[in-house]
Amino acid sequence: GAVVSQHPSRVICKSGTSVKIECRSLDFQATTMFWYRQFPKQSLMLMATSNEGSKATYEQGVEKDKFLINHASLTLSTLTVTSAHPEDSSFYICSARDWGVHTDTQYFGPGTRLTVL
Amino acid sequence: SQQGEEDPQALSIQEGENATMNCSYKTSINNLQWYRQNSGRGLVHLILIRSNEREKHSGRLRVTLDTSKKSSSLLITASRAADTASYFCATENSNYQLIWGAGTKLIIKP
């Protein structure tokens, strides 16, 4: 099946720094990617829908200036957490839809665990 | 709220028993999907059922969907210790976004 990778898998940073997380579809083109965050012992919350070549669509309550999303190519979307603070510590997961073959299926990355000190 | 609801929140059963988890949602859907997640790890896609389907099987898994009640159930038969994990349902809406349930934490006791 299709594979989605995320990098890095784990990052620890100081408060106030910015962190970039990459999401790549490895063997298919993804015009649409989704970003989620998951707090410990909780479910996933959709943060934004990333569309190749256009601006991302953010869910209510998600600050677009805080969580910058760039979907510059059909295989790469990036999420930058700007001026990170301890409350941004979370598990960030991306997914990508494979429109070409399995029209129902989203493929998930393994997640990035962000810890802000 | 964006989230759907799942029950029970936690379920602890003996190995070999069947486990049933339920999911309810609020809006119309394209499909409903079930995922498993081991503690602190990524998601594993288990099964997808389309809105025009009522039941689906995959190995020891059986999923039902009742669109009139906006609910689904996941049955795991003959449970194993390795089935211990959190299970989430997610519904795909008309924008192809996945809306997630709160999850059920399943513990299989050996």
Image: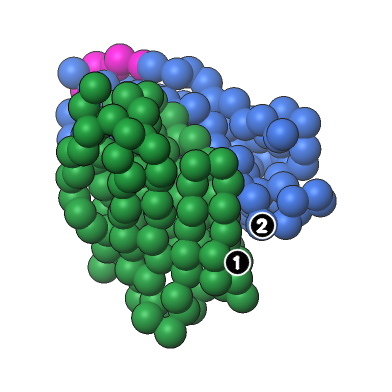
Chain colours: A blue, B green
**Residue B83 on image: x %, y %:** 37, 31
The residue marked by circle 1 belongs to what chain?
B
Type of residue at label 1?
Arg
Location of residue B100 with respect to B18 vertically, above or below: below
- Which label number is shown at residue B21? none
Point 30% across, 40% down: residue? B17
Q: From the viewer's perspective, is A94 left or right of A39?
A: right
Asked if the residue under mark 1 is in contact with the one under mark 2, i.e. CB atoms within 8 Å, the reply is: yes
Tell me the chain of label 2.
Answer: A
**Residue B59 found in image quarter:** top right
Q: Nearer the viewer, residue B16 or B100?
A: B16
Q: Amino acid at mark 2?
A: Asp
- Work out whether residue A92 or residue A67 is closer to the camera in this orientation and state it: A92
Helix, strand or loop for disc 1:
strand
Q: Is residue B59 left or right of residue B76?
A: right
Q: CA distance from mark 2 to mark 1?
A: 9 Å
- Residue behind mark 2: A104
* Residue A35 picture location, percent across and down: 47, 45
The answer to whether residue A91 is visible is: no
Looking at the picture, how far across and down is residue A15, in whole percent? 22, 23
Within 10 angstroms of label 1, few (less than 14), some, or many (20 or more) residues?
some
Residue at 60% in and 66% down: B50
Magenta span includes A14: yes
State the image coordinates of residue A77 (x, y, percent, origin top left).
Answer: 60, 38
| Quarter of the image where the C terminus of chain B is located | top left
SS at badge 2? loop
- Does residue B108 show up? yes
The residue that mark 1 highlights is B50
- Residue range in magenta is A11-15
Between circles 2 and 1, the one closer to the viewer is 1
